[in-house]
Amino acid sequence: MPHRWTIAFDADDTLWQNERFFQMSQERFGELLSNYVDPHDLKARLLEAERRNLGFYGYGVKGFTLSMIETALEVTNAEVPGQVILALLDMGRDMLAHPIHLMPGVSEVIPALAAQTTLVLITKGDLLDQERKLAQSQLGEYFSSVEIVSEKTAEVYQRIFARFETPRVMMVGNSLRSDVIPALEAGAWGVYVPADVTWELEHAEMPDHPRFCQINNIGDLPEVIGRLNK
């Protein structure tokens, strides 16, 4: 029987943990620069550097590492010790090599949904890093398509969804700004799965929309699909 749904998933902090590793590195960053600037001020300076650099470096660990180095140079008037820069580079490499940890319910739900729906992975970030994490997850075989994009917009979602001939489409993710709101604008359902920690630049107001819903974890998704199929 033809699939009735195409369901797209975000990757980082939806299928596997990600942001908490950035938070841990940011705490270490504060320790390394504690003699130069207050940790709270450093966090704000780093966030501004990340925002400023998105158009140049994109999303992911490499851009984050470069933003840390840039911030370290700024707050020390370019007098940051060389060993600090080396420590920041080591942190970036450690993040890129860190094994992934699937979010609760993912290992059960993804195979089950793949048997009855068309699954797509849509994620932002560095190409090599995202491919590495997908390979480690052992989930790749369940996705009909993997899309690693520079930004998630309504136009991007429309272009991807247009390739799948199913009556209904859905985007599932932990970011209201990137996963849910533009998917709703593209005509899809948007399912919000809050993560314990979400990057500040991904925050947005909760949408008031008939195709929006929120679930506690991925394990609740089959029930949502079943309800919508009635």
Image (cartoon, rainbow, N blue to C red):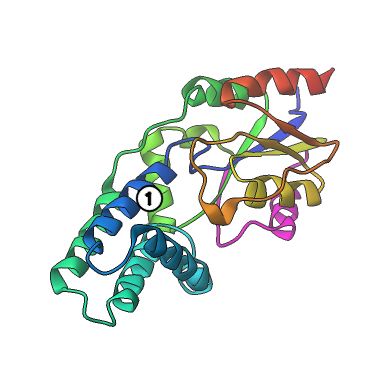
Drawn side of residue 47 relative to residue 6, left or right: left
- Secondary element at tag 1: helix
List x then y, in percent, for residue 136.
Answer: 35, 38
Q: Is residue 97 visible?
A: yes
**Which quadrant, please, contains the C terminus?**
top right
List x then y, in percent, for residue 59.
Answer: 48, 60
Farthest residue in the left direction?
A: 83
Drawn side of residue 76 relative to residue 125, left or right: left
List x then y, in percent, for residue 189.
Answer: 77, 38
Q: Which stretch is magenta?
A: 145-166
* Magenta-colored stretch includes residue 149: yes
Q: Hey, which quadrant is residue 7 in on the image?
A: top right
* Magenta-colored stretch includes residue 44: no
Q: What residue is pinned by disc 1?
A: 22
Q: Is residue 197 above or below residue 186?
A: above
Q: Nearer the viewer, residue 92 or 135?
A: 92
Residue at x-position 76% and y-position 27%? 2
Residue at x-position 51% and y-position 50%? 199
Q: Nearer the viewer, residue 23 or 185?
A: 23
Q: Is residue 37 above or below residue 115?
A: below
Task: Give the residue type at disc 1.
Answer: Phe
Q: Is residue 158 above or below residue 2?
A: below
Q: Hey, which quadrant is residue 207 in on the image?
A: top right
For label 1, the crowd category at 10 Å Cα-Cα, with few meaning under 14, some 14 to 19 and many 20 or more, is: some
Residue at x-position 52% and y-position 67%? 51
